[in-house]
Structures are given as structure tokens and as C-alpha cells.
Amino acid sequence: MPTALIVLAAGQGSRMQSDRPKVLHEVAHAPLLVHALTAGAAVAPDRVVVVAGHGGDAVETVARNHDEDVVVVRQEEQLGTGHAVLQARAALAGFSGDVIVLYGDTPFIRPETLEAMLAARAEGADVVVLGFEAADPGRYGRLIATGDRLERIVEAKDATPEELAVRLCNSGVLAADAETLFALLDQVGNDNAAKEYYLTDVPGLARAGRMSARIVTCPEAETMGVNTRADLAAAEAAFQARARAGALEDGVTLIAPETVFLALDTVIGRDAVVEPHVVFGPGVTVESGATIRAFSHLEGCHVSEGCVVGPYARLRPGAELDRNAKVGNFVEVKSAQVAEGAKINHLSYVGDATIGPRANIGAGTITCNYDGVFKHRTEIGADAFIGSNTALVAPVRVGVGAMTGSGSVVTMDVPDGDLALGRAKQVNKPGLAARLMAKLKAEKARRTQ
């Protein structure tokens, strides 16, 4: 059966105290909306519709950057969740199959849960609602059911004491046949205090129409919604706990898991070692057997097998480390390819560069890649040796097996096998240091009298 997703992302999120749309706040370096779209992608939907409202242009940009096939529609007036789903009707014209309604601010629904909902549909349920056992049911709508057969959804404010005692609560996530869903939504009224059209009315209307409504349950943690900054922090903590556990299960050594922070798309191979206080930004792949040492920060980079990074290293977007390369303490690498066995061990900046196999980059080396307008590349050949405190003024090439003297400023290409010296000749002035120091001390004494 074909499947479509409708992701509701129109809310302003006033409790976030932010000008940014709520669904664009980030967990694990990815907007909440991207988390929801990623979860939904696991069921291989044929169509995806995002319903945007507040900050619609920004929401559309994020959605389409994530998946260019996403269709974004607008809910110009915020008239409730049922009204929001109806805005997707035109985008799903001609679609015949199941629809799952997700929420852009509920980022942790697992693929297994969505598959269970679709399985319930395949077994004949007309409407499937996702429920959870709440530790504190509080303000959640209650699912009144017989077994897994849903009778109705009762909002907390309208519930009797007996109904309030029910711990099975409504997540808001729902699945139904597209034609059935929109037909039932056409029957939803707004006879309530807020004058809004609620998606939660759909199961009751289905039962009234002699259709079946069934409940699929999941752990409460999956249904975590983000409405405040405190919720956002809790969601970050929940993601990190789950991601760390997943890494450990996959064979990654995390020496102090609670101090390592991962992004939504972080990939780390088995037998890799991650020391304490490492931060992974978006777009990082670390292959098997690599070591990321303490207090390093990585984003947009690729670290191959056997590499050692850090401690206190920074890999920025475009850093590509081939096998057994080493990037040491207080080294920053950006938009650079570091070939197999190359070493950049201390206190260096390497940007917009190609470092050849087995090259050695001495401490304090800088690739001077920016002229104030344009970026320029530095090329360092295989087995080259760059002396400490060398400034390589790009565009420049240091050839295979070439060397630079410590403290050189290299402004011209260095042919293969050559030694480049780009520094002033040293001159010693006999006794001048002692005379100068005596003069300075005498002046200091005079000023303190």
C-alpha cells in the first residue's frame, strides 16, 4: 500500500520565547522538523507534505534542503490540527493509500512504531492512533479503549474522574486511508472554546460511522514534544543518551559516554575510540579503528581507518583524513585533504590545502589561504617536510620530498627535492642585550622615585 506523510509544522511555539519557528530549533545539530522527516523516511513514503505556517519561508527552505521532493503547503490561519491536515488535501490529490500524520515538534518517533501503525492498517483498522502509558497523564488526552480498540479520545479538561484515572494517553500521531481521513475531517466541527478543528475528533467520528479505530502503543519517550526551552534541553539529553547507547552497541569505545556529544547524522565505525569531551557537529564520518582524542571538535569531515585526531583538535567542513593520518593537539584543518600517513602534530592551521602521503607538517605551520577576497590553495607533495613556524602563502606548491626551513615565509613554489629558506639572515649585536636591559632598569627606577 502506498504511504504518504503529513508533517504538521505550522505552530509559532510562543512558549519558546523565540522569533524562530518552533520546528526549526535544533536537537543534535538538526532542526526538530528534520528529525521528524528522518523518522518518517524510514517507511519509504511515496509523498511527503509539510504544513507550514509561522515562518513558513524558513520552514520550507529547511524541508526542501532536507528532501527536494517534499511539498510544503501553508496554513495561513491557525485553526487547529484538523484544519492543518486539511491543508494537505490538494497536495495529495490523486493519492490512494495510507497517510500518517506526524508533528514537526515531536522528533523521536521510531521507525518500528510507524511500521506497527501501518501493520495495524493492513490488518483492517480504518484509523490507527498512537498511544503511550504516561508516568504523569496530567493534561494529555485519554484514550478510552477496550483492549486495543479505541472507543474515543477524551481531553483532560473534559474527562470524568474515572477517565482521568486512565494512563493511556494520546500522542496525536494518527494513520488512516487518505480518502477516509479527509472524509472524516470534513465532519469535524469547531464547537469548542478555541473555535478550532481538532484532529483528535477523527477517531470518535470513525466509531460513530461504524468504522474501526485501533491503538498502537509506544514508550512515552518516543512521544516527547518540544514546547519550551526546557523541553528542548530535555530532548537534547534524550537524543544523546540514545545515540551514545547505539554507538556502544555498534562496537564504538566511548571512554566517558556522558561527555561525548553526537549529531543526528554522526557515523562512527566499530573499534573506533572516542575519548572524553568530544563534540561531533553535523556531517561527520569516523571509520573503524580511528581514535578521536579528548576535547576535539569535528564537523563536516571524514576520518579514515587508523587516524588519530587530537587532543584539542578541530576538524572543520571539508577536512578529509586518509588512512593513518595524524592531526594533533591544537591543530585546525579546514577544506583540506590529508593523505595517508601524513602528520600535522602540533599548533598548526591547514586550510584549503592538499597534503601528500607521509608529509610532515612542523609545529606552528600556517597555510595563508585568504587574501581578503579570495581563498587560495596550498599543495604539499609526498614525503615533504615543512619546518616549524613556516608560513605558506597560497597559492603555493611544495614539491615531493621538498623541505622548508623553520621560520620561513614561502611565497614561491618549491620544486621537488629542494630546500626553501625564506627568512632574514640572523645578526648578533655583541653586548647589546645587557646594555639595553641596564638602560630599561635604570628608567624604571627613575619613574618609581
Image (cartoon, rainbow, N blue to C red):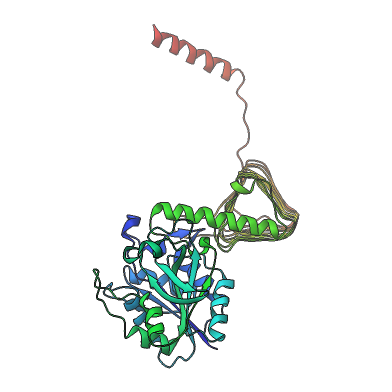
Q: For the image shown, how many numbered marks are present on the structure?
A: 0
Specify the farthest residue to the front. Answer: 162
Image coordinates for residue 324, horizontal then vertical, percent: 75, 55
Looking at the figure, which quarter contains the C terminus? Answer: top left
**Closer to the camera in the image, 354 or 347:** 347
**Closer to the camera in the image, 195 or 93:** 195
Specify the farthest residue to the top. Answer: 449
Query: Residue at image x 55%, y 89%?
Result: 1
Residue 290 shows in the view? yes
Is the residue 444 above or below the residue 184 in the image? above
Query: Residue at image x 50%, y 65%?
Result: 132
Is the residue 350 above or below the residue 5 in the image? above
Residue 435, picture quadrant:
top right
Is the residue 182 above or below the residue 286 in the image? below
Q: Is residue 428 left or right of residue 99?
A: right
Q: Is residue 242 left or right of residue 418?
A: left
Image coordinates for residue 118, horizontal then vertical, percent: 54, 81
Residue 140 shows in the view? no
Image coordinates for residue 215, horizontal then vertical, percent: 50, 75
Residue 325, picture quadrant:
bottom right
Query: Residue at image x 52%, y 60%?
Result: 221
**Closer to the camera in the image, 134 or 16:** 134
Query: Residue at image x 45%, y 68%?
Result: 171
Residue 199, picture quadrant:
bottom left
Q: Is residue 301 left or right of residue 68?
A: right
Image coordinates for residue 23, horizontal then vertical, percent: 40, 65
